Amino acid sequence: MAEEPAPADRGAAAAPQGVAPKAAAPNGAAPEAAVPTGAAPEAVPPRGAAYLGLGAAVLAAASASIWIRLSTAPSLAIAFWRLALAAAILAVPLGLRHRQGLRAIRGRDLWLAAGAGGCLALHFAAWVASLRYTSVASSTVLVTTHPFLVLAAGRWFLRERVPPAAVAGVLLAVLGGALVGWGDFRLGGTALYGDLLALAGAAAVAGYILIGRAVRQRVAILPYTVLVYGVAALALLLLAMAAGTPLTGYPAREWWLFLALAVFPTVVGHTAMNWALRYLRAAVVSVSILGEPVGATALAFLLLG
């Protein structure tokens, strides 16, 4: 990422070019967001609304493991249709009301958003595959160790302050991941392979969050998410073609599961998270996702037994 001028308050992310920096907000919130240059403006939410949106994102994202485990389709087909359908759903309001926001995205932000889409594709390809080899709890706990990378990179590249609560959350996540990995190592190579795939998904989602935090200061939510989901779907399409994975010919039950994955954890979950990234620090968003294993494990117990 290109280096940006340092803000007056080192606890906040650097202000994008052409946008005046704002004073830092208390309690881990980001400074009041400026209107993105050339993009559709977004109203600054009331205090607490960004946290509520983030909480809704975590709850919706927690359902992804369940839909995936219920599906019998190949991993790449699941990931492709999840993102392709999500991009198509969000493209409708974008085309009807916000086309100017997509046209206004600058070249640098286009490349960054494409990079975020690539990270998202890698995250889904690795994480969805991990669920075939290890348990829902193990996969979800390990894939949510990404706050460690987000904290380190956010401190140096985004110049964001690292809250003590975030450090504590990361330490707990790393400890939990180590315990899960040791248990699966004792279970055998198949479970360990699934754990390694989940960790690869963690590294990819860290890049996705960090890029989203930077680009969302300048780009509105609809054009950003349609672009990211679309690029991710294209990357997964190429992977599926290279691997010879069939993308059609599935029974109706599978298509309903693809649609559920597109709507709940993606259109609702990931889009709400990307919305919150404009108003909350990357570390706050990343650590909040640590609540996903709790929801995923509870749903798995209730629905899968």
Image (spheres, helix red, strand yellow):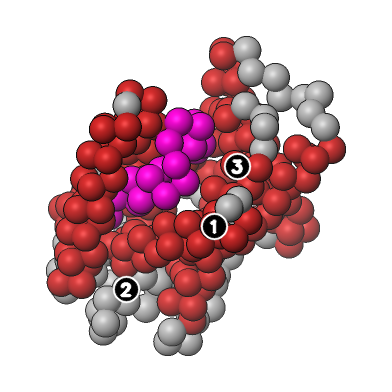
Q: Which amino acid type is shown beneath numbered disc 2?
A: Ala
Question: Is disc 3 surrounded by few (<14), some (14 to 19) or many (20+) residues within 10 Å?
Answer: many
Question: Is disc 2 surrounded by few (<14), some (14 to 19) or many (20+) residues within 10 Å?
Answer: many
Q: Nearer the viewer, mark 2 or mark 3?
A: 3
Residue underneath mark 2: 30
Numbered range of the magenta stretch: 122-148
Indicate yes or no whether the magenta region holds residue 147: yes
What is the C-alpha distance between the residues marked 3 and 1?
Answer: 15 Å
Q: Nearer the viewer, mark 1 or mark 2?
A: 1
Q: Is residue 37 above or below residue 9?
A: above
Q: Position of residue 141 (x, y in %)?
A: 36, 50
Q: Which mark is residue 301?
A: 1
Indicate yes or no whether the magenta region holds residue 243: no
Q: Is residue 219 left or right of residue 217?
A: right
- Name the foreground residue: 125 vs 293: 293
For mark 2, give the secondary structure: loop
For mark 3, give the secondary structure: helix
Q: Quadrant of residue 279?
A: bottom left
Residue underneath mark 3: 68
Q: Position of residue 12 (x, y in %)?
A: 23, 69
Q: Earlier in the sequence, mark 3 or mark 1?
A: 3
Give the residue drawn at x 45%, y 31%: 133
